[in-house]
Image (cartoon, helix red, strand yellow):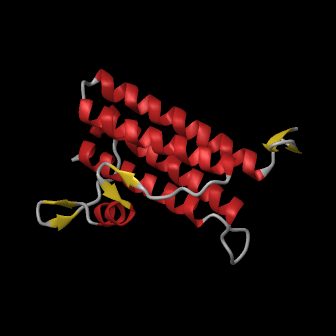
Amino acid sequence: MTHLFGQQLVRKNHSRIKLRGKLDSLEAAVLEVQCIAAEKGDTTLVNDLNEVYGFAQHLLGCEVTGKPVGNILLMGMDSAGLRQASHNIVQGNTLHFKVPSYTMGKVAVALNSLRAQIRETELCAVDVFCPGEKCDRMDMIEGLNRLSSAVYILYCRAAG
């Protein structure tokens, strides 16, 4: 058993505890990618990942406390800007998605892995907060979705 809220105990396999574990793992994965970026001397990416890490921590805190996520701002973009940028990756004059490959190098591969982990966390959050037609924490779902968008943008930059 473990604490869900205050003195409320639940089994360790409770869906909210599983989500918290996913969010913990997500934070750890961000730090791993940040270490790779630091080893490569990519201070811009290290700084962008600081924002990603801080927002992941914020999401975990919001899940634990029940507080709303609030405004999303990552890499100078709000929620709408992140969505727009991630849906309109342009290289040259064409919309472009880079299919992941080991030839892209460790940074791009690590960012793609991080993006996939965020998406898995988002799906876990959907299971927790949207058991039927109604979604109780759409702010958490949107926050994870925009976190995925931010990391996708970073991946495209690294892969490009």
The image position of residue 155, as x and y in percent, is: 32, 46
> Residue 160, relative to residue 129: is it above or below?
above
Q: 147 or 115, which lies in front? A: 147
Q: Is residue 7 left or right of residue 128?
A: right
Q: 63 or 125, which lies in front? A: 63
Q: Report how many numbered discs are placed on residues in the image.
A: 0
Question: Which residue is at 39% across, 41% downward?
Answer: 51
Quadrant of the image containing the N terminus:
top right
Q: Is residue 80 left or right of residue 43?
A: right
Which residue is the extreme one toward the top? Answer: 39
Q: Quadrant of residue 126?
A: bottom right
The image position of residue 127, as x and y in percent, is: 69, 61
Question: Which residue is at 31% across, 66% downward?
Answer: 84
Q: Is residue 39 left or right of residue 26?
A: left
Question: Which residue is at 28% across, 39% downward?
Answer: 104
The answer, for residue 10, to whether it is visible in the render is no
The image position of residue 139, as x and y in percent, is: 55, 62
The answer, for residue 56, to whether it is visible in the render is yes
> Residue 102, relative to residue 66: is it above or below?
above
The image position of residue 37, as x and y in percent, is: 32, 29
Q: 128 or 65, which lies in front? A: 65
Question: Which residue is at 60% across, 58% downward?
Answer: 123
Which residue is the extreme one toward the bottom? Answer: 133
